Amino acid sequence: MVNFFANAAGGGLEKMSAFAEGCWVDMVNPTDDECEEVAACAGVGEDMIKAALDEEERARVEIDDGCSMFIVDCPIIEEGASGDSYTTLPLAVIYNKKCIITVCLKGNTVLKDFITGREKVYCDKPVHFALTFMLGNSTRFLYCLKQIDRKNHRIQAEMGRTMRNSEIIKLLDLQNSLVYFSTSLSANDRVHVKLSKAEAVASHEELQDLSEDVGIETRQAMETCNIYKSILSVTMDAYGSVISNNSNDAMRKLTIITILLAVPTMIAGFWGMNMPVPFQSGIKFYMTGWFWLVIAGALALTAAIAVIILKAPSFGRPAGAAGRKRQKKDKKDKKDRR
């Protein structure tokens, strides 16, 4: 889809039906024919226009034959069955003496603000247009980072009630999004540094102020992203430790049960086939004394082993007087801290 815009008499943007010099060409997932037509009208290389149509294209600067291209990564919120996901897409701002061209695979929120008049831009000032877009793009990154932080708090609240694999996967998706954002913001900052060194910016005070605002917003977004990434990394490690501790506790209980059951199983294997048992055909009750004696001995031995195991320090409980003293000391320390 290709749309043409130009500044109206009142200062806003108005949509045009065809290409004209001094216009802004907004291209969203254009076809090959549209790319070829715009390239012929604007005098821009078709390769430049198609550069941003590659999802893996990195943020960079390219200047060739009077045409300047700045590719920056933009945050994208995608709706899915499991909730919103966050990623980035490249967007190219291309300009020469004839026009300004923006190319992206999907519609961009910052460009929509330009079209609706929420942000004032000038189609005949390409450097101002590019800096204004970068400023809005950095602000959009900050908005997405806040949404990620809120989603992180909601997931942690759910995990406080019940810990499921779905919540762990959601946290992992957020961590991946922060990695994408961190990489994209670093690349965007390098593009901004190159643009700020352009002669048009250095010789114009208003553009210098706008460039400084872009740098401040970009660095703030980078710092915020790094903070959230560190917090989420610590959170993932903490939940990993909790899951490991829960698994160890479950294995401890299963081990105790297995050991306790092994004793009567072993004794029953020794005596079960060579002694009369109750309710057996032709066996009187007084003839089953040895059976009851073996059962009683197995239960007594099992109880004794259970007491020894549960009091053993290796199973998480301090044994003896030293253990009781240590427990009292721990309780006292907790009261003192309170």
Image: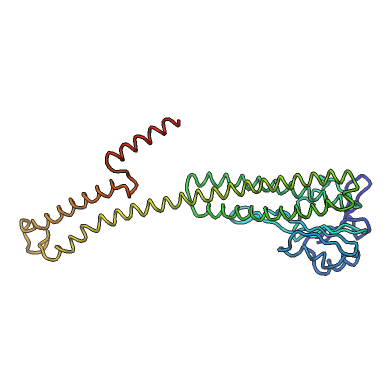
Q: Quadrant where the N terminus lies?
A: bottom right
Most foreground residue, 283 or 54: 54
Q: Is residue 273 above or below residue 191?
A: below
Q: Is residue 15 left or right of residue 170?
A: right
Does residue 222 appear left or right of residue 17 in this picture?
left
Extreme residue toward the front, this view = 322
Residue 252 image offset from top left, x and y in percent: 34, 52
The image shows residue 335 at horizontal and vertical percentages of: 41, 31
* Residue at left offset 21%, top offset 60%: 265
Report the residue at 90% width, 56% height from top: 23
**Total numbered badges shown on the rendered structure:** 0
Residue 28 screen position, x and y as percent:
79, 60
Q: Is residue 271 above or below residue 188?
A: below
**Image position, residue 84 (x, y; %):** 63, 53
Say how the picture is coloured: rainbow
Give residue 62's quadrant in the image: bottom right
Left or right placement of residue 145 versus residue 254 in this view: right
The quadrant in which the C terminus is found is top left
